Image (tube, grey):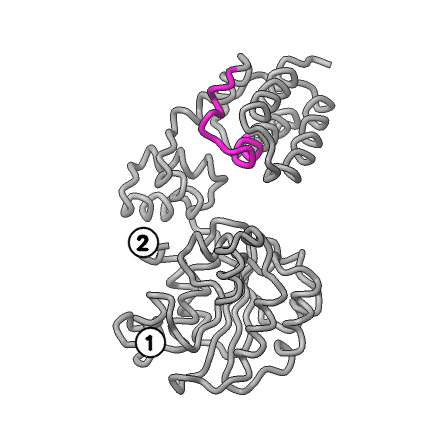
Amino acid sequence: MTHALAPWLAAQRRNLLAQRGHAWLLQGPSGLGQFALAREMVRAWLCEAATEDGACGTCPSCHALAVHTHADVCVLMPETQMLARGWPLPEKAQAELDDKKRKPSREIRVEAMRDAVEFAQRTSARGRGKAVLVYPAEQMNTITANALLKTLEEPPGDVRFVLASEAAHQLLPTIRSRCLGHTMVWPEQVHMVQWLGAQGVAPEAAESFLRTAGGRPDDALALFQSGRSPQAWAQLPQALLRGDTSALADSTPAQAIGSLQKLCHDLLALCVGAAPRYFAHADLPPPPSIAALAQWSRALTSAARTAEHPFNTGLMLEALVAQARNTLHSRT
């Protein structure tokens, strides 16, 4: 993220920096700032003029980290995320992608983890220790996680780890047990609206984006920055009721499935007398039967597993909208 650190993340940073430990696991739902907090911890650990409130932001160490060239920092992410965030790939991996030998990995590759283990054993270049940041940690498969395990258990004296996860339950129990755990704070609505306002989001739009994102501030900001319209989101249920495929025309299959899962969730909530989470109650149609919604939910879960496959996007979106329309009109 390039925007100012949210105040609730700054408070967590201060708390974490006051504690000792060579390995941290930051855990919680997506959109709460795990990566930003992990990066801030790394910055403070290596900063040449750090305070209890974090890194100075101006020293050579802070600058090197800002431009992704710090010799004492190893960042482990899926290659797709490394490229999206502007972090350099290892030379061999970049050469393989340049030569079209394979596509960027969506997992943290075991080769990258082995490089990180070797990095942990080297002497610090700047003399202030080293740091390994792993995000999202649940994207390590079993082989990759086991490659990290021994170093995490018996680390060299000057290396620290911070693992950030949006699904910590998927990590190996042995990984979790070797880290100090921190559960991300879910901020108050009023504080999130104020923070989004500082990013240029009008209060009414901020509340709408927060509802769309399920109350997750980073996701709400991403929706705003993507140019999404709060009005289009509010109109989505009625558009699906009509079978209007244009309602999802600007979405990838994965995004479309995510939107439909949110709608299915809210309709199921209405069926059992609970409040909707992602849509305003007035924007929702009368819910079909629980049986119909449960069947739709299972179908969407199945579709999500293959959302990244090279299907014809237009045909897939048409099929998803037709399935949604049929479910919404079902009364059995």
Q: Which residue is mark 1?
A: 61
Of mark 1 and mark 2, the one earlier in the sequence is 2
Q: From the image, which quarter does the C terminus lie in? A: top right
Residue at 56% across, 25% down: 317
Q: How many marks?
A: 2
The reply to whether the C-beta atoms of the residues labelled 1 and 2 are less than 8 Å apart is: no
* Residue 168, position as x, y percentages in the image: 62, 58
Q: Secondary structure at mark 2?
A: loop
Depth order, front residue of 327/183:
327
Residue at 47% across, 49% down: 31
Decide whether residue 58 is among the magenta residues.
Answer: no
Residue numbers of the magenta segment = 244-259
Left/right placement of residue 256 relative to residue 85 reads right
**Amino acid at the residue labelled 2:** His
* Residue 303, position as x, y percentages in the image: 66, 33
Predominant SS along the magenta part: helix
Residue at 53% across, 12% down: 242
Kindly indicate the quadrant of the structure image that contains residue 250: top left
Other residues around mark 2 within 10 Å, as few (<14) / some (14–19) / many (≥20): few
Left/right placement of residue 280 relative to residue 51 reads right
Q: Which residue is mark 2?
A: 3
Kindly indicate the quadrant of the structure image that contains residue 219: top left
